[in-house]
Image (tube, rainbow, N blue to C red):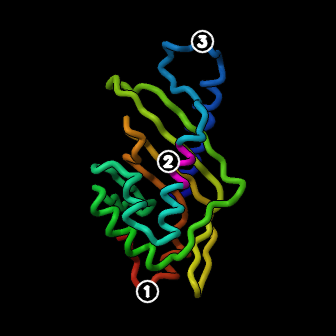
Amino acid sequence: KNNKMKKIFLTLILSFAILSCETPTQAESDFPSVVDSTQYEEIANGFNDALNSQDVDLAMTYFSDDAVWSFPNGVQVEGKEAISNLMQTTSSIWTSIENSDDTNYLALEGTNEAGEDFKVLLSWGESTYSNDDTSITIPYHNVIFFNDENKMSFQGGFYDRTKFVEAYDEDPIK
């Protein structure tokens, strides 16, 4: 299931990248445009830095009130308060979450079929979760959608949770 999801995700990324490069004058195209990812990377990294400093309240300022966080095991955590509770738990388990220096980013902006504008940051690479006793490095794919105020409204991660489940006394994401 995980490999199938990775293939679908990679196909989507490559399709968006290829299609958005076809012509620079596709203002009326149905396809999203590739845009500079810097501002979205700064938001995602700001959230991560806040978690690494154990400041969950600051980390939550990056989310919209109705945000959703989707995990690869099918669990969806809905609402800023529920995400905050989960982050309190996970930041008490992991004291550091670091993305590799060669993390790839792709930002897209467009309009969906309902006529609503969207902004999304796709990222993939390796991420290392550490605490005093253990360190786990996993390849991952991540999708973050942003609302009009550039708050994170949806985050979805695609990765193998096996090493995490082995490290937990009790799985916090279930």
Q: Which amino acid does label 1 sit on?
A: Asp
Q: What stretch is highlighted in magenta?
A: 40-45
Q: Position of residue 164 (x, y in %)?
A: 51, 75
Count of marks, rendered view: 3
Evaluate whether residue 26 shows in this view: yes
Q: Which amino acid does label 3 sit on?
A: Thr
Q: Which mark lies nearer to you, 1 or 3? A: 3
Q: Which residue bears the numbered disc 1?
A: 169
Evaluate whether residue 11 shows in this view: no
Judging depth in this view, the residue of 97 and 158 nearest the camera is 97
Could you say which quadrant of the image residue 85 lies in? bottom left
- Estimate the spatial distance between the alpha carbons at disc 1 and disc 3, rounded to whole Å: 54 Å
Q: Residue at x 48, y 66 (%)?
A: 51
Q: How crowded is mark 1: few (under 14 residues within 10 Å), some or many (20 or more)?
A: few
- Estimate the spatial distance between the alpha carbons at disc 1 and disc 2, rounded to whole Å: 28 Å
- Estimate the spatial distance between the alpha carbons at disc 2 and disc 3, rounded to whole Å: 26 Å
Q: Residue furthest right?
A: 102
Q: Which residue bears the numbered disc 2?
A: 143
